[in-house]
Amino acid sequence: MCAASRRWGRRQRALLWVMLLAAWEAAWGQLRYSVPEEMPKGSFVGDVAKDLGLQLPEIRDRGARIVSEGRTQYFALHGKTGHLVTADRIDREQLCENVQQCVLRCELIVEGEMQVYGIQVEITDINDNPPSFRDIEAEVKVIETTAAGSRFPLPDAHDRDFGRNSLQSYELSGDEHFSLAVQTGPGGDQRPELVLAKALDREEAAFHELVLRAMDGGDPARTGTARIRVTVVDVNDNAPVFSQAEYTVRVPEDVSVGSVLVTVTATDADEGVNGEVNYAFKKITEKSSQTFQLDSETGAIRLLLSLDYEEGDSYELEVQAYDEGGHFDTTKVVVTVTDVNDNVPEISVRSALSEISEDAPSGTVVALLHVQDRDSGANGEVRYSLDGDVPFRLEKSFDDYYRVVTARELDREQVSEYNVTVRATDGGSPALQSSAVLALRVLDVNDNAPVFAEERYSARLAENNAAGALVLTVRATDADWGQNARVRYRLSEGRVRGAPLSSYVSVQAETGALYALRSLDYEQVRELRLWVRAEDGGAPALSSNVSVLLLVVDENDNAPQVLYPPPAALRAGSGSGGAWSGVELAPRWSEAGALVAKVVAVDADAGQNAWLSYELAKATEPGLFRVGLHSGEVRTARSPLARDAARQSLVVVVKDHGRPALSATATLSVVLAESVAELLAELGSAADEAAAPGEPEAVSLTRWLVLAVAAVSCLFVAFLLLLLALRLRRWRRQQLLPPAGGALRGVPVSHFVGIDGVRAFLQSYSHDVSLTADSRKSQLRFSASGSCCDTLPARPLPDEPAPLLGDEDPAGALPVDPAAPSE
């Protein structure tokens, strides 16, 4: 009970020291624990979360894990408690043979932070291995004449445990002729020797049976035994002698299996059988016995297994040479293994991101790598690099850990995925290298606005289109990805002729197709200027605008409209004078080409659809009149003849140049007269015919026409008398007055003024003449004081006033010079 209490107290004190040591190491970012070997899987090693100040949610959410060197993982992290536990049984003798302090190293990696914490776990020894002899039965030959006190080597035991649990003492039992002596070797090991305590007599006993027991210092102690058979032989007075007290040999680790590494030689001065020497390993570890083979006759040491410098760089062997008489000699063989560059650098990806946002700042950690080379010296010096021109760089993190971080900003639109090759090259000759590939996908950020395929769009749409007609399609692309690259279109606000722009056109949000919502009329809207906005689906959204010009193309949908002469409906609605408002007057003495009238028409269309041409479709007297194709001027094609009817009816067709062409007609009534009296009479008769019989309005019209003719006649006589008086008095100013015959030559019909349906001259005393060269059009302006109409006074030349009417020109006509310029 007391022993158990003491052991418990020792364990408590040891645990306290371990906790204090762990706290001190944690302060420096390095944890150190201690655990006995052979603990079952899942045994507690240390409270990592507490010692590092990590919270359990951080360990779970940020992906913390334990990584050990080598292929076997001896430790694991308990996710719920944050404890470091064993992941498998640990055999200290297997991991750390002949090593005083067995320390296993591992790292705690917090992936979310790309942080590494070093952990050292010391594996303490327990007494789980008893001392054992390589040969449980051994034979010792002793010459019967050997003096008491002589010593003979015995096989030594080996204990795989360490410290007090290793071999501590030997015991010998079985015969009074022998005793046991234990010597301490150069390395502090115990070497048992058989001491002859009493002289032997071969005739008394040829063999002696002994038991050699080896004991360790464990609690409880473990033992191992070997049976020793002592054979008493005849006299042999010379012992074998090695040529060297110590053999040293250096061999590369890639030496082939079966090669002779070294040959030890010993000589014996005896002759015959007593001089024959045999060789055997005196002291050798289990590993060395599996690696080397000693030829008992020749002393040659051969290689049984391949050497590995990384597993062992030196071996110490003890070889014994003995003869048949039991004499022996020992020598030490040291095999030094030299390193060969036979290990490529190993790159382990301990933590890595598979995705990274393109707006990640420079210096963002994307991977945590562990690189090591098991070779030594220059063969183990490793250089690191990244292949290609990639926006990443390597940084040293902790011991053999390196971080791959971003060296500059990323752009997914240029490179969306990276295969980053990390290359490690050692310093051997030839150099060995290895590589690891990191696959990294760049996540999109909405950093690109939509871009239209064209700087501006324009389209032409014929008027009178169907509602819903497709006008054009705008197209914008976004260099981003996914939702950030999804483009939607909409119209910017605007108004057309007071109405919202959206009532004229619309844009399909997904495709960018622009549709006309109503039938357009070129005569009302000739173009639409609008803006289309493209907006992506990012948050916040980015947008861009493009100008769209929609030109409405004219169609020939409007017939020409005749402004003069007015249509019959207008003439009929103008009162009593409306029936004759379209009558044109032409003197019978008019020459060919004299201007009679001008048809004026317009077309609401544009371009070719508004180009008008005039044709004479029907005439009372064919060949008497002609119409200008483009001017619409009605002129005499020849001089009127006496046989020509006084009243001429002309039908003029006005056509545009559309396809198909549209047209309108204008009807002109032209009266041919020699004098004013004939003119008035013709107009009067025309008025009588125009009045329907039985209607009181016709009677009233006739009465007024007669009165008008009488008044004009009186005025005409008065004008003649006045002009005669003025001629006699030779006044400088004279006024124009037609002669008695009333004949006019060269006076345009357009300057006749209608009074109640009859066109006649107003009271006028003078006229101005203006001539044009292109249309041969002459103009007369009459004036009279006190007239109710607009008048223009005559302006004769100051130097040489020429009379417009005189006795020399009874007709009172002024010749028209076609070449004279217009005023």
Image: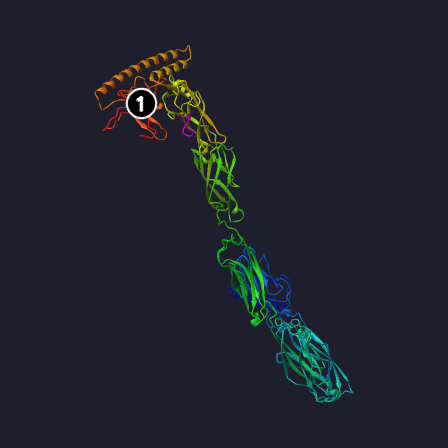
Q: Is residue 200 visible?
A: no
Q: Is residue 500 above or below residue 238?
A: above
Q: Residue at 51% of width from left, 52% of height from top?
A: 413
| Name of the residue lying farthest toward the top | 694
For disc 1, the marked residue is 813
**Is 48 or 624 nearer to us in this picture?**
624
Query: Residue 80's image quarter?
Result: bottom right
Q: Is residue 195 left or right of residue 587?
A: right
Q: Quadrant of residue 77?
A: bottom right
Q: Which element carries disc 1, helix, strand or loop?
A: loop
The residue sitting at the right extreme is 203
Badge count: 1
Q: What segment is highlighted magenta in the picture?
A: 626-634
The location of residue 818, given as percent across then percent down, is: 34, 29
Q: Quadrant of the C terminus?
A: top left
- Is 379 above or below relative to 274? above
Q: Quadrant of the N terminus?
A: bottom right
Up-down relation of residue 374 to residue 141 (above or below):
above
Q: Is the residue marked by circle 1 packed among few (<14), some (14-19), or many (20+) residues within 10 Å? A: some
Measured along the vertical axis of the image, is residue 443 above or below residue 710?
below
Q: Position of residue 402 (x, y in %)?
A: 53, 63
| Residue 814 or residue 655, whichever sits in front | 814
In x, y percent, where is residue 631? 40, 29
Residue 412: say if magenta. no
- Whether residue 559 sits left or right of residue 237 in the image: it is left
Q: Going by the picture, which residue comes out furthest to the front?
A: 808
